[in-house]
Amino acid sequence: MKRNILTVMAILIAAVAYAQPQVGDWAKFDRYHEANKEVTTAPRVVFMGDSITDFWVNADPDFFTSNNFLGRGISGQTTSHMLVRFRRDVIDHHPEYVVILAGTNDVAKNLGEIAPENSLGNIISMCEIARANNIKPIICSILPCNFFYWRPEVKGQEKDIIALNVLLKEYAESADIPYVDYHSVMKDEKDGLPKKYADDGCHPNKEGYEVMKKVVLEYL
């Protein structure tokens, strides 16, 4: 009897939680809502990503302004977030290229478990949407990282990052899309991001962004 009561209570709690209204702007359209209105000339490149792209604009603003590049990174976002806002933050600007750097927060399980093939699927969808709108996609590898300080309970991320990068590279090659391999260039002997490139082991510092800049410009 007691077990039945607990089961019913669990079902009711789950039902109430499911019925709660979700956050309306889940993908954070508001982040660049005003900034998007101010874009009057089509950028050559839009950089789409998470905090690594987000922080890059502040770390080296001249890289973006002098090259007519547009940064559209949002800290903490997964590939699912990016796919949802891809039209507003990329397609509507009609760039020549979109540089997609995504997947770190999928591996970190920011939204819970997501299979690597589903992370890949989100990036494939972004590439297909870009091509359908005459925008050339460029796929970037996930940067190395062997400890997520914001998700310390996650383990084995260095292996998961490598595994997802393998899928990204295979798809890029099969679809004739450039693949920017930051991981191989920046990793240390433990498949992490060394202190010289990232103070926190995950987000590049100025020197780290300098390496990324040199690598990606070869594809632009």
Image: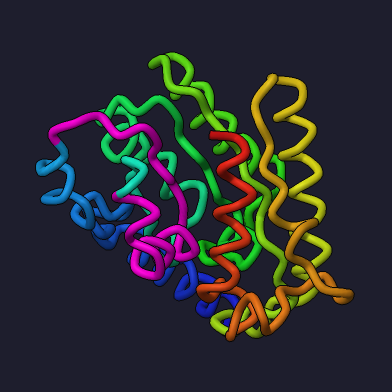
> How many numbered discs?
0
Between residues 145 and 112, which one lies in front from this camera angle? 145
Quarter residue 135 falls in: top left
Q: How is the image coloured?
A: rainbow
Residue at x 58% of width, y 72% of height: 207
Residue at x 31% of width, y 40% of height: 68
Locate residue 110 relative to residue 148 in the image: left or right: left
Rendered location of residue 12, percent (x, y) = 40, 68
Q: Is residue 180 above or below residue 163?
A: above
Residue 183 counted in the magenta span: no
Q: Is residue 41 above or below residue 3?
A: above
Q: Is residue 214 above or below residue 187?
A: above
Residue at x 42% of width, y 15% of height: 134
In the image, the segment drawn in magenta is: 40-65
Between residues 111 and 68, which one lies in front from this camera angle? 68
Locate residue 169 relative to residue 153 in the image: left or right: right
Residue 58 counted in the magenta span: yes
Which residue is the extreme one toward the front?
66
The quarter of the image holding the N terminus is bottom right
Rendered location of residue 126, percent (x, y) = 49, 31
Rendered location of residue 73, percent (x, y) = 39, 55
Residue at x 32% of width, y 48% of height: 66
Between residues 109 and 193, which one lies in front from this camera angle? 193
Q: Is residue 186 above or below residue 154?
A: above
Quarter residue 156 falls in: bottom right
